[in-house]
Image (cartoon, helix red, strand yellow):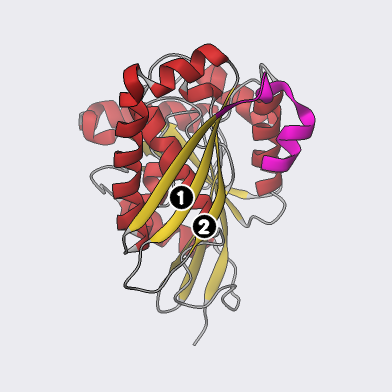
Amino acid sequence: MITKSGYVSIIGKPNAGKSTLMNKFLDFKLSAVSKKVQTTRNRIQGVLTGKDYQIIFVDTPGVLEPKYEMQKFMKKEIRSSFLETDLVLYLIDGMNIIIKDLKKIEEDFIREFSSFKRIIALNKCDFLKQEQITDKIVTLQQELKFEEIIPISAVTGLNLDLLKLKLIEHLPDGDFYYDRETLTDKPEKFFVSEIIREKILELYEEEIPYSVHVEVREFKEREESQKDFINADIILERETQKIILLGKRGEMIKKLGERARKDIEVFLGKEVFLKLFVKVRKDWRKDNRFLKNIF
């Protein structure tokens, strides 16, 4: 039996729906999802295996112009995804098409783009009428270069079967990179930290979500009759942020812990004891040495 296997880098602007799309394809929540920009910071690989195909999706941070050191590292994460990719899936928000921004992305990654086939997925088409979708496709055909353009909805699943077929069609023949049971290359510890960070994105406003880093310091797996023990640090940039995150009489950190614990238990399939510590490391997003350890 001939099999197809390869890497597909999902790129696009912040909030285009990249993480939602990968989660939908895998039928499993790997990437954190939020309406806030910069939800995804690191490359996350999700492996979708069928009878005769294996697609390794690479969910990348949203493309933006770096304003500080952490965003520069995020942009490097996008570039590094092209080192092993076979196909680029360019996800575009159908509700917010700005041609000059899309061309700027093409200019920034012209060397990488010129080396790979590209498929455009026009997302959020469940909010558009058919005539609007047609008009947007015509505009994109005139302005951008690509192999295919497919209108989809990452939320409802509209045309995702068609998109999957097109991705498989453009992948090279080859043996599978991972066994059939593998869902991701990341360890459980990474996803626990992402779940905690996602709950921070949900619970807090303004600068808190963008100034936070979560690091799982301890992850002890115990016998089935006992809860796993997880010890995590929440790192912020300012003492004032720490006060906000803790909340009055510690009410907010307690709520955060409860929400994160429930989702972690669903992810791991067993009960856990979660202990959170809040620490301050001034201006960590501008600290090159610190950033090299987390990217």
Q: Does residue 22 sit above or below 70 in this rendering?
A: below
Q: What are the residue bounds of the magenta stretch?
A: 279-294
Q: Which mark is residue 192?
A: 1
Residue 281 painted magenta: yes
- Residue 97 horizontal/vertical position (percent): 42, 22
Q: Considering only vertical position in the picture, is 259 above or below 243? A: below
- Helix, strand or loop for disc 2: strand
Q: Are marks 2 and 1 in contact (CB under 8 Å)?
A: yes
Q: Rate crowding at label 2 as few (under 14), some (14 to 19) or many (20 or more) other CA atoms within 10 Å.
A: some
Which one is closest to the eye, mark 2 or mark 1?
Answer: 2
Q: Is residue 28 visible?
A: no
Q: Which residue is mark 2?
A: 219
Vertical position of residue 156 compared to residue 143: above or below: below
Dividing the picture into quadrants, the one containing residue 282 is top right
Q: Which residue is drawn at the image coordinates 25% and 47% (left, top)?
A: 158
Q: Give the mark nearest the N terminus, 2 or 1.
A: 1
How far is the residue under mark 2 from the one under mark 1?
9 Å
Q: Amino acid at mark 2?
A: Phe
Task: Decide which of 105, 219 is in the foreground and name it.
Answer: 219
Q: Quadrant of the C terminus?
A: top right
In-front residue for pair 237/210: 237
**Whole-percent x, y for residue 140 in the image:** 46, 30
Q: For the point 47% across and 43% down, which residue is it?
A: 194
Residue 21 located within the stretch drawn in magenta: no
Q: In the rendering, at what x and y percent does residue 93 appear?
A: 39, 29
